């Protein structure tokens, strides 16, 4: 049977956390991130299950289909390690992990795509574009370094919370309401898009005001109405801009 242990030591947890950065190194069409997940879990599983035969059975749980947003990987690895400790102690059934791994990973993947990829990374990209167009290169480099450090801190803290709190960490994530927060950030992105438009094409006069108003209205409308496809929003943006430019050139 597995080793009866209370908690994994700091060195083992650090090794698991650092391996989270390689979650996509063996990405494939069969199991997506499953090889990277097994690699990240390996230091902890080796401690919890010193018997090679039993450890092979445990590893099979992580060699199934698995995929999530890479910003959530440390949190999930910490959560899985927390569950494995309980399973090794015999206080939780092994089937519990399969259920959690399947539902939680894909749910967080959808949230991650909506919040991190579609909202936060868009905010960063538009902010960088505005700072570049305005010539604030030092501020851009400072912001870039600050965001890089922030992401690493978020990953470290979420890994720790996943391991320490177990299932409770999922309730905390739910309270964050990241989907609705992401929608608000998209509105801010619409404003940044307008600012970049003015910085990149400084013409002055009423034509610039018309361009700015058109961009912010259509971008905010598209960001707050998820039922509208991006293609339709882009077509409306292009058509409206042509009409506005034609009117102001008369």
Image (cartoon, rainbow, N blue to C red):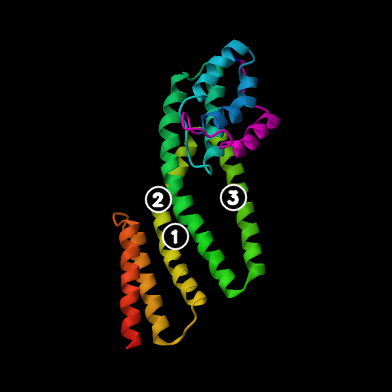
Q: Is residue 29 magenta?
A: yes
Q: What residue appears at the point 39 percent right and 77 percent down from the top-left corner?
A: 211
Residue 103 falls left or right of residue 48: left
Q: Is residue 177 visible?
A: no
Label 3 Cα neighbours within 10 Å, binned few <14 / some 14-19 / many ≥20: few
Could you tell me how far apart the alpha carbons at marks 3 and 2 are, in whole angstroms?
19 Å
> Upstream in the sequence, badge 3 or badge 2?
3
> Do the numbered discs 3 and 1 sit on residues whose CB atoms are within 8 Å?
no
Q: Which mark is residue 223?
A: none
> Upstream in the sequence, badge 3 or badge 1?
3
With respect to residue 119, does 84 lie above or below?
above
In terms of image quadrants, where is residue 8? Answer: top right
**Disc 3, SS:** helix
In terms of image quadrants, where is residue 233? Answer: bottom left
Residue 145 falls left or right of residue 242: right
Q: Which mark is residue 179?
A: 2
Q: What residue appears at the point 44 percent right and 20 percent down from the top-left corner?
A: 95
Label 2 Cα neighbours within 10 Å, binned few <14 / some 14-19 / many ≥20: some
**Disc 2, SS:** helix
Quarter placement of the N terminus = top right
Magenta span of residues: 3-32
**Disc 1, SS:** helix
Could you tell me how far apart the alpha carbons at marks 3 and 1 are, in whole angstroms?
17 Å
Q: Is residue 201 visible?
A: yes
Q: Position of residue 155 (x, y in %)?
A: 58, 44
Of 137 and 84, nearer the camera is: 137
Q: What residue appears at the point 54 percent right and 23 percent down from the top-left corner?
A: 84
> Upstream in the sequence, badge 2 or badge 1?
2
Q: What residue appears at the point 54 percent right and 69 percent down from the top-left corner?
A: 130
Q: Which residue is mark 1?
A: 185
């Amino acid at each position: 049977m597995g080793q009866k242990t209370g908690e994994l030591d700091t060195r083992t947890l650090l090794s698991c956390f650092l391996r989270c950065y390689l979650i996509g190194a063996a990405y494939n069409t069969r199991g997506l991130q499953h090889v990277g997940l097994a690699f990240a879990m390996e230091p902890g599983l080796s401690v919890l299950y010193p018997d090679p035969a039993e450890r092979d059975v445990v590893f099979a749980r992580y060699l199934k289909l698995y995929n999530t947003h890479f910003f959530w990987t440390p949190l999930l690895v910490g959560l899985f390690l927390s569950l494995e400790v309980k399973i090794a102690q015999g206080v939780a059934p092994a089937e519990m992990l399969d259920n959690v791994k399947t539902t939680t990973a894909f749910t967080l993947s959808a949230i991650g795509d909506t919040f991190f990829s579609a909202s936060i990374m868009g905010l960063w990209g538009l902010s960088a574009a505005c700072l570049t167009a305005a010539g604030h290169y030092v501020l851009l480099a400072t912001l870039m370094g600050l965001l890089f450090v922030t992401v690493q801190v978020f990953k470290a803290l979420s890994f720790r919370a996943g391991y320490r709190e177990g299932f409770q960490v999922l309730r905390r994530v739910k309270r964050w309401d990241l989907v609705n927060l992401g929608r608000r950030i998209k509105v801010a992105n619409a404003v940044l898009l307008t600012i970049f438009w003015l910085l990149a094409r400084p013409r002055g006069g009423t034509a610039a005001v018309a361009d700015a108003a058109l961009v912010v209205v259509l971008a905010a409308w598209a960001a707050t109405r998820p039922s509208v496809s991006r293609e339709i929003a882009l077509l409306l943006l292009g058509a409206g801009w042509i009409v506005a430019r034609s009117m102001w050139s008369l």
